[in-house]
Amino acid sequence: MSGSGGVSEAVSAGPAVRSRGRFRGLRRRWLVLLIILAVLGLAGGIAWALLGSRLFVVRSVIVTGTHLVPASEVLAVAGVKPGTPLIRVDTAQVAARVAAIRQVQSVRVSESWPDRLVIAVKERTPALAVAAPGGGFDLVDADGVLVRWAARRPRGLPLYLTTAAVTSLRGDPDVSASAAVIAELPAWLRSSVQSVTAPSPDQVTLRLAGGVTVVWGAADRAAAKAEELALLMRTHAHYYDVSAPGTAVTN
């Protein structure tokens, strides 16, 4: 009897075990479904907040680094409309539009969450002055780009002597070489430079106060050339060629 009772218990327990297993499986499926719905709801909420709501839209555009270019011009060229979802602003396109302004050398556009766009501008810096046909001076940077016009030549900005129109100087290697040489000169020498010419990038020639001419050559080895020139100038000559340090020529 006891044996048959044991068999009877084993048979009767089988459906209960299967029922509990189905329940647990169903519960897991519901749990997975709830998790998926929660994730979708969260993603939808985030998407709505970023794209459809008024929480993360452009409310202000800040322009920094401008001195020559009016901030109003930068804002107009940037073309970012207030109320645009911040996530939809193509910062690369905005930067490209602002970089097209002549006086702008580079620009960085970044989001400042939750509602601000920052346009950081680096303007071009005048390196040389070119006599303007109608009077005054066109001030160009190291790339030969016209930065602005001035009625008088700014103090410390050498006159670049050329017969070419200022509009043709952009990308000119002679202008770049001249600007590079001026930038590398020690202060005592730079302050006395009145004008500069460059028949070629490796033949930059300086005209100093008092009618002294210095053939500087290329922009390399500036420290050695300056040291040699300082010694040679004790002879009070009017012509110095230090383009090849160690074999300087005076006259």
Image (cartoon, rainbow, N blue to C red):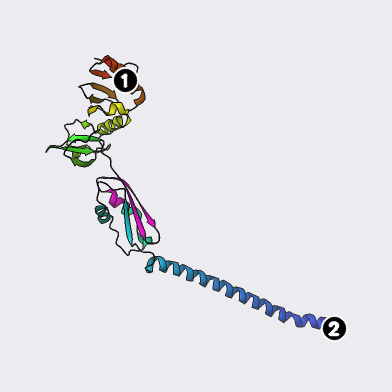
User: Label 1, label 2: how many angstroms apart (C-alpha)?
Assistant: 119 Å
Q: Residue at x 71, y 81 (%)?
A: 16
Q: Is residue 136 visible?
A: yes
Residue type at the position of mark 2: Ser
Exactly how many numbered labels are in the figure? 2
- The residue sitting at the right extreme is 1
Image location (x, y in percent) of residue 40: 48, 70
Mark 1 is surrounded, within 10 Å at the Cα level, by few (under 14), some (14 to 19) or many (20 or more) other residues, namely few
Q: Is residue 218 visible?
A: no
Marks 1/2 in contact by CB < 8 Å: the verdict is no
Image location (x, y in percent) of residue 171: 26, 37
Which image quarter: residue 163? top left
Q: Earlier in the sequence, mark 1 or mark 2?
A: 2
Q: Nearer the viewer, mark 1 or mark 2?
A: 1
Q: Residue at x 30, y 16 (%)?
A: 232
What segment is highlighted magenta in the picture? 95-124
Q: Is residue 39 magenta?
A: no
* Image vertical order of residue 179 relative to residue 233, above or below: below
Q: What residue is shown with label 1?
A: 230
Which of these two is toward me, 224 or 18?
A: 224
Question: Going by the image, does 33 lie left or right of 242?
Answer: right
Residue type at the position of mark 1: Ala
Which of these two is toward me, 140 or 209?
A: 209
Q: Is residue 110 magenta?
A: yes
Which image quarter: residue 211? top left
Q: What residue is shown with label 2?
A: 4
Q: Which mark is residue 173?
A: none
Image location (x, y in percent) of residue 149: 18, 41
